[in-house]
Image (tube, grey):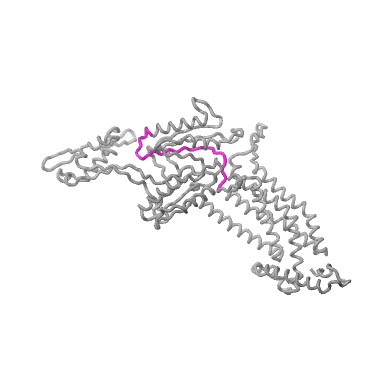
């Protein structure tokens, strides 16, 4: 895995924050959640080497939340839940870390927080770039609710059993063990006692949530007076069911009957909310990727696809699709590909109008191909990670930069030929003369991107106020812009050498082919060189011309073989 160039959606670096999210079974008491959260907090302090009041110069703060503000923002549920907890570790700014990395803390915290029964724990870091779905995102869809539940649970258990490398922990966005107490009114008993279902429901609602009796005004503020059971009674089911329903009976006056005498109690489990996607019920399996161990979302999703395809327990009315970051990466790659095609078409149109030819613009456009080869070669040689977005944007921008190299050489060669110089000598002289402008142009662009590529930082404010530039290398912005900068540097460097080697040779071949093409197809065909729609027709004609001309040369060689006044130069001179 480490021998290949890695591909990611957005580049990632050392985290500035680490988030630990705790989720216990629904209905868990907030005090119990707080006790588990404190256990996690102590383990985090141990990893950070901050036990017993010790100080870690890399850590700015550690903040723990329970219930309020403890929900994972990526889960879509930001409500206050007593079974939720969160720990936020914030690190100091990059320049204050003195070269120390915070990435190892992420994997270390993940390792020590395992093994708590009944607790669902996830350790994440902030995303670079715009918000995206989780790296691993598997959607199970169906209109058959029972089949949907069985398939989602079966798929999760199957993937957990095979233990796909790089997957942290698969989680479902639906809670299958949500406890529920169902109170069913005994209608015969209620009718015999003369109480309605609405009165029973109102009594339970008043006991739990209260009922407004009056209001009290203090100054300009007005407060409601609520009547409800105290906290101990609300948390105790026996006390709640012993709450009496008071009502007026026409024959016997006011009566009070305990709720337990009027209802049947059932202890069940229910599901949380199930969302819909594309008009179908959907359950999503998500997970983080263990990037600290060398895995990338691209290769992890490829491994998951293999196991999902081999999952045999999928009914016909259930669909399983991999979405999330992988889907967004594919869509972004397709968009950048379309942008590249549009850029090439516009560049080709401008060059055709400038040169009044199609062969010369094609030669110039080969510079883009050379630059892309240089980019891939540079990333493979250095082992840097390729970012689909930033590297793709860099390649599209590179297309508009490298074409100028070929234009400089071809234009100068045309100018020398117009002065009467032979094609071969003109091409050689153009390469010698234009090497300095091409080199200076490429070098200026490379030097301009180099500070961003290496992460060179200088503080101009302190430079002039304190005469201290505070120079350091690295930073958060470097992680984001580094792939784009190195893309342009690799592409320009490789395209510079290819300009001096390939462009003159291709120009010479194209000019030498014009004469046989004119002799065989006439001058009108040559005029089509400036019409882009006929390029597809013209290229096969070029190859056919080369083959036919080679046949003619061989025939002439055999015909004049042994003639004292004829040599090879004479036979091929008309080329």
Nearer-the-camera pick, 328 or 104: 104
Q: Which residues, given as a range, are shown in magenta?
A: 9-32
**Residue 486 picture location, percent across and down:** 65, 47
Nearer-the-camera pick, 391 or 25: 25
Judged left or right of residue 323, residue 504 is: right
Q: How many marks?
A: 0
Viewport quadrant of the C terminus? bottom right
Q: Quadrant of residue 101?
A: top right
> Residue visible at 70% across and 51% down?
494
- Residue found at the very far right of the displayed protein: 564
Nearer-the-camera pick, 440 or 55: 55
Nearer-the-camera pick, 405 or 143: 143
Q: Quadrant of residue 405?
A: bottom right
> Does the stretch in magenta take in 20?
yes
Judged left or right of residue 392, residue 156 is: left
Question: 212 above or below 376?
Answer: above
Judged left or right of residue 196, residue 6 is: right
> Residue visible at 48% across and 42% down?
168
> Residue visible at 65% across and 31% down?
466
**Residue 161 picture location, percent across and down:** 45, 45
Question: 28 above or below 407?
Answer: above
**Residue 345 picture location, percent across and down:** 63, 61
Viewport quadrant of the N terminus? top right
**Residue 64 picture location, percent across and down:** 45, 33
- Residue found at the very far top of the displayed protein: 52
> Residue visible at 15% across and 43% down?
193
> Does the stretch in magenta take in 4?
no
């Amino acid at each position: 895995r480490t021998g290949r160039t890695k591909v990611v959606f957005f580049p990632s670096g050392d985290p500035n924050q680490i988030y630990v999210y705790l989720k216990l079974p629904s209905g868990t008491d907030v005090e119990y959640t707080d006790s588990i959260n404190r256990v996690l907090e102590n383990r985090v302090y141990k990893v950070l080497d901050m036990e017993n009041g010790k100080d870690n110069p890399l850590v700015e703060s550690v903040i723990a939340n329970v219930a309020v503000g403890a929900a994972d923002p990526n889960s879509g549920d930001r409500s206050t839940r007593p079974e939720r907890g969160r720990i936020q570790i914030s690190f100091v700014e990059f320049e204050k870390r003195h070269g120390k990395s915070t990435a190892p803390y992420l994997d270390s915290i993940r390792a020590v927080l395992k093994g708590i029964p009944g607790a669902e724990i996830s350790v994440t870091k902030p995303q670079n770039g715009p918000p995206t779905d989780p790296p691993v995102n598997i959607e199970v869809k169906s209109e058959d609710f029972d089949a949907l539940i069985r398939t989602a649970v079966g798929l999760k258990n199957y993937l957990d059993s095979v233990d796909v490398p790089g997957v942290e922990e698969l989680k479902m966005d639906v809670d299958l063990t949500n406890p529920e107490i169902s109170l069913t009114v005994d209608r015969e008993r209620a009718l015999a006692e003369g109480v309605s279902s609405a009165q029973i429901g109102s009594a339970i609602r008043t006991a739990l949530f209260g009922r407004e009796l009056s209001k009290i005004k203090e100054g300009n503020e007005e407060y409601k007076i609520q009547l409800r059971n105290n906290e101990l009674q609300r948390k105790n089911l026996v006390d709640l069911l012993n709450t009496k329903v008071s009502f007026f009976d026409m024959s016997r006056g006011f009566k009070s009957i305990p709720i337990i005498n009027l209802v049947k109690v059932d202890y069940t489990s229910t599901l949380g909310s199930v969302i819909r996607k594309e008009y179908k019920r959907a359950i999503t399996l998500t997970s983080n990727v263990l990037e600290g161990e060398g895995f990338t979302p691209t290769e992890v999703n490829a491994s998951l696809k293999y196991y999902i395809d081999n999952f045999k327990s999928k009914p016909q009315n259930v669909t399983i699709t991999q979405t999330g970051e992988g889907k967004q990466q594919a869509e972004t790659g397709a968009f950048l590909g379309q942008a590249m095609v549009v850029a090439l078409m516009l560049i080709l149109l401008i060059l055709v109008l400038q040169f009044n030819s199609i062969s010369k613009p094609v030669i110039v456009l080969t510079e883009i191909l050379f630059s892309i080869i240089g980019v891939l070669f540079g990333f493979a040689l250095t082992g840097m990670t390729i970012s689909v977005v930033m590297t793709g944007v860099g390649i599209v921008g590179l297309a508009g930069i490298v074409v100028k190299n070929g234009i400089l050489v071809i234009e100068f060669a045309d100018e020398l030929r117009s002065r009467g110089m032979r094609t071969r000598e003109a091409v050689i002289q153009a390469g010698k003369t234009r090497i300095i402008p091409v080199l200076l142009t490429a070098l200026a662009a490379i030097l301009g991107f180099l500070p961003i590529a290496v992460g060179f930082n200088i503080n101009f404010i302190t430079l002039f106020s304190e005469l201290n530039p505070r120079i350091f290398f690295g930073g958060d912005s470097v992680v984001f812009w580094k792939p784009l900068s190195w893309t342009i540097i690799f592409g320009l460097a490789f395209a510079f050498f290819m300009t001096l080697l390939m462009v003159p040779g291709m120009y010479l071949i194209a000019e030498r082919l014009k004469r046989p093409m004119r002799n065989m197809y006439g001058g009108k065909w040559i005029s089509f060189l400036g019409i882009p729609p006929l390029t597809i027709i013209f290229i096969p004609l070029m190859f056919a011309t080369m083959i036919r001309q080679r046949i003619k040369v061989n025939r002439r060689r055999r015909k004049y073989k042994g003639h004292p006044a004829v040599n090879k130069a004479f036979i091929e001179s008309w080329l």
